[in-house]
Amino acid sequence: MLYNDSIVALATPSGAGAIAIIRISGPEAITIGNSVFKSIKNKDLTKQKTHTLHLGHIMDASKTLDEVLVSLFKGPNSYTGENTIEISCHGSTYIQQQIIQLLLRKGCRMADPGEFTLRAFLNGKLDLSQAEAVADLISSDNEASHQIAMQQMRGGFSNEIAKLREELLNFASLIELELDFAEEDVEFADRTQFHELLNRIEFVLKRLIDSFAVGNVIKNGIPVAIVGEPNVGKSTLLNALLNEERAIVSEIAGTTRDTVEDELVIGGIGFRFIDTAGIRETQDVVESIGIRKTFEKIEQAQVVLYLFESLKFKVQSSDYIVEIEKIKNQFPLKPLVVVINKTELLTDEEVAEIKKQLQPLNVILEMISAKQNLGIEELKNQLLSFVNTGALRNNETIVTNTRHYDSLLKALEEITKVKYGLETNLPSDLMAIDIKEALYHFGTITGQVTNDELLGNIFANFCIGK
């Protein structure tokens, strides 16, 4: 991929605002910008130093479109590695359109999605994993996902992979050298050191692969299903967790006919709460569909909150314990939190009796009053405890990208083959094949190995203007 043209796009969100930024990048970016810009001090942009600001007007022939501030960046010292200018204009959609149309007439073309960052990658300003982290940073909506994206954009993940790849490449070179002297039967690669390197690579790969379980939930949010009988306060609990009237609350049983979803950030981690239709025997066709969806949502959720109304639980505890056991047996790997709502209606002795009855089930119990907002913070803390944030607190590398995860799995598979070959004295030429495959998968992560189709798939998901 070679780009010899200049591109333009709106770098700020579309629509009216206080200001808008229009970005131009390419060999002729400064020349094109200079052709429509009239400095208040009669400066020629092509003769100005890089990383400077210039006040003036955008002119369409003799017509003034707007007073603007132009930021000037000369390649290779720019985001894209090319000549780049950014025009800060007033945020009127009319002004934005007029300036962009003028620049198109002057020789620019509209940028494709992610093309500015693609050019940064092609010009060596970012590796591929850093470029992908740019998109993650833009879409981050909580502290944890922001922290991970920033770490990857600074090169934390790619540096770790690049170092391992370089060490493996050095040994690969020695193995290849042995093949050139096959008749002399010599070994240039120290097998003991090579085995130690493979063990170290295997350890790092497994740690990175394991981190994807945490990284994926941090990036996409942790789905939590709120289930229980009709009218026990599921919607009230959702509203209390979100601190807003998101779900309909009614005294009529079966009010929630479909699932209601919303997100909440707890301790920097995103949780996606799903308020489901109440579980009960019903002849209502619509409600029956909602109940079927409830079990589908439990299947999709990572945590289940099983909500009970305190007075009903006190009276029908044996029936409800059977229901809890049924959910535990059907979804044995999902954390199940039994939440007793409306606890303000219970005495201390009744609360103690409920805890005693539930103890043999080995479930997590939370006593709350959703209406009075009691026990809500304790419930939030319990939910947070299900996320292993240790790696995040220790600033360790966490994998969030499915493409990276897939490449790491394939690299680990090849490293396992190399290790087996080393332990069974496999001929060097056969080991060299597996080493090359491992190097290939390492390279696909950082972009040392790539193709137009891969780049097209990655950058097509970017917003235009980035």
Image: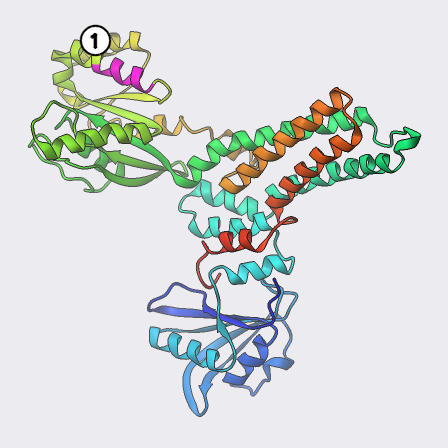
Which x, y percent locates residue 248?
A: 14, 39
Answer whether residue 372 is visible to the viewer in this image.
Answer: no
Is residue 288 or residue 15 the one in the foreground? 288
Q: How is the image coloured?
A: rainbow
- The residue at the point 11 percent across, 35 percent down is 286
Quarter of the image with the N terminus is bottom right
Query: Which quadrant would residue 328 be assigned to in this image?
Result: top left
Q: Secondary structure at mark 1?
A: helix
Which x, y percent locates residue 59?
A: 46, 86
Answer whether residue 432 is visible to the viewer in this image.
Answer: yes
Residue at numbered disc 1:
353
- Seen in the picture, residue 18 relative to 263 is either above or below; the reply is below
Indicate the amino acid at tag 1: Glu
Is residue 380 or residue 102 the one in the foreground? 102
Looking at the image, which residue sits at the far right?
184
Is residue 237 or residue 95 the one in the foreground? 95
* Residue 326 painted magenta: yes
Looking at the image, which residue sits at the far front?
183
Which x, y percent locates residue 24?
A: 52, 71
The span shown in magenta is 323-331
What is the crowding at mark 1: few (fewer than 14 residues within 10 Å), some, or many (at least 20)? few
